[in-house]
Each structure stands twice: as C-alpha cells, then as structure tokens.
Image (cartoon, rainbow, N blue to C red):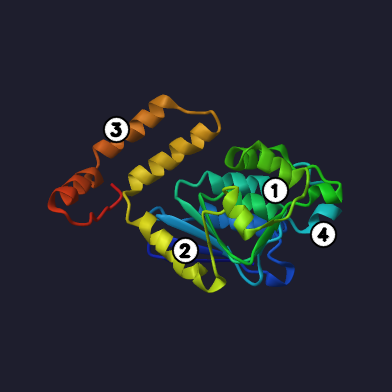
Amino acid sequence: MIDAVTDGPFTHITLNAPARHNALDRPSIAALIQVLNQLPTDTRVVILTGSGKSFCAGAALGDVADSDWTENPLTGLCDRLEALPYPTICALNGGVYGGGVEVALACDFRLGVDTMRAFVPPAELGIHYPPQGLARAERLLGLQVTRRLFLLAERFDAPALATVGFLDQVMPPDDLDKATIALAQKIGALAPLAVQGMKQSLYEIGRGQTDTPTARARITACFASADHAEGLAAQKTKRKPVFKGH
C-alpha cells in the first residue's frame, strides 16, 4: 500500500489503496513509519500524497472495531512524520477523513484540490480521539476550529479549509502535481542547514520545549557553513546560490 520513490533530493510517498480510500491499517502504518525511518540523509523535501479519489480515510475501521486502540498507532505515525528533519508537503489529491486529517496536519505544507472535503467523525462513532491528535490540531488550527472539527464533526470544503489555515494552496486536480513539484523545488533550492534547523526550532516552539543552547548551536553551525558563504557570494554577484547542505 505504501509506494516510495526517491528522485534526487525529493522522496515521493504515495498511499496506494484506493479501493479503501487509503485507510491505514496497522501493517500499512508500520510500513510508512519504516519508509520515514529510512529516508536518504541528503533528502531535502518529502512529498506525501494518495492515489484515487481520496487522500486518506484515517485508520481502517476494521482494525479499530476489532482491537483496543487506546494506544493509537496512528498517533505514533503522525509524531514521526511531524518530527522529520526534512520539510514535508502533503499533496491532498482528494478527500481526507478521520485520522487522515491528522496525517495531513503532521506535514509542514498542505496543497489540496478544489473538489476535496475534510471531516473527522469520531464523535459520530462513539470514539474519543487521542489527546495527542487533538493537541496537534489545536496547535496548528486554533482551539475553535479544532472544536468544529472534533466536537461538531463539521464538514469542510476546500475554500473553508483554506480560510481556516488547513490548506496553503487550493487548485484544480490537474494542477496538483505541478504545484507540488514547484513548491518542493522552491524549498529544495534553499539552504538545507538553515531550513532544517529552523524547522526543528519551530517544532520545539510549538511544544513549548525550546532548547536554547541547542538552538544556538544550530544558529552557529549555519553561520559557519559553506552554504552561508555561498549565499553571501551569490547575493554579492547577483546570481542564484547553489547550496550543498554543509
């Protein structure tokens, strides 16, 4: 179900079970975590998308119904995805439901097609969503939007998702791949040490876990890097910099 292809500094990951709207069962969650754990060290951007009409329908209901999900493996997947050192783009090719919404929120940027919908139905199924997922949504979308998602099980269309800050860009389906690649190339052209260092700092800030000495060490490393020298040289000679990641 999990297809992964690396193309230079970009890794493309596709949820490929369209018949079940790319719902994630325990084996596919484990497979996706394994892919994330084995990304090449020279990765600059990770792109996550789905196949078929939906991006992801969250946890497979058969798994939820037949086992104790008090310790939700989907939470661990989202934690791992959010903690990646590389910027992540979620290319939402279609609807996103339940835990799939959290998977998308675990990415740094979200692009969506203008026909997509999103909703989180646990309250309609008698399920209490894990607190870690609620906290992730609240950090990124704010408390009131999170209430609308989880307490009301409100349905959001693409324009509404852009309005509340869930989507960074909305486009026709035929434009999604082009827009995703353009964003990945824009990120990939920036200085990797700076981008990855600031991503880590933002990750810590979002959790109230800022490690000031470590953040200062990242700042010092960037100032001392060849990429910083390259950036200054490129600015001086009015050319585009070519960053190597060191």
Asked whether disc 1 touches disc 2, contact meaning CB atoms under 8 Å apart, the reply is: no
Residue under label 2: 180
Q: CA distance from mark 3 to mark 2?
A: 32 Å
Residue under label 3: 220
Q: Which quarter of the rendering shows the N terminus?
A: bottom right
Q: Mark number for residue 97?
A: none
User: Which marked residue is nearer to the observer: mark 1 or mark 2?
Assistant: 2
Work out whether mark 4 precedes mark 2 in sequence or the reverse, and give the earlier one: 4
Residue under label 4: 62
Residue under label 1: 73
The quarter holding residue 242 reads bottom left
Work out whether mark 3 precedes mark 2 in sequence or the reverse, and give the earlier one: 2
Work out whether mark 4 precedes mark 3 in sequence or the reverse, and give the earlier one: 4
Element assignment for label 3: helix
Question: In the figure, is residue 79 to the left or right of 119?
Answer: left
Q: Amino acid at mark 4?
A: Gly
Q: Where does the image place residue 239, in percent across and percent down from the top left?
A: 18, 56
How dense is the environment of label 2, judged by Cα within 10 Å: few (below 14), some, or many (20 and up)? many
Q: Amino acid at mark 2?
A: Thr
The relative height of residue 152 versus residue 201 in the rendered view (above or below) is below
The residue depicted at 23 percent of the width and 43 percent of the height is 228
Q: CA distance from mark 1 to mark 2?
A: 28 Å
Q: Amino acid at mark 1?
A: Pro
Element assignment for label 2: helix
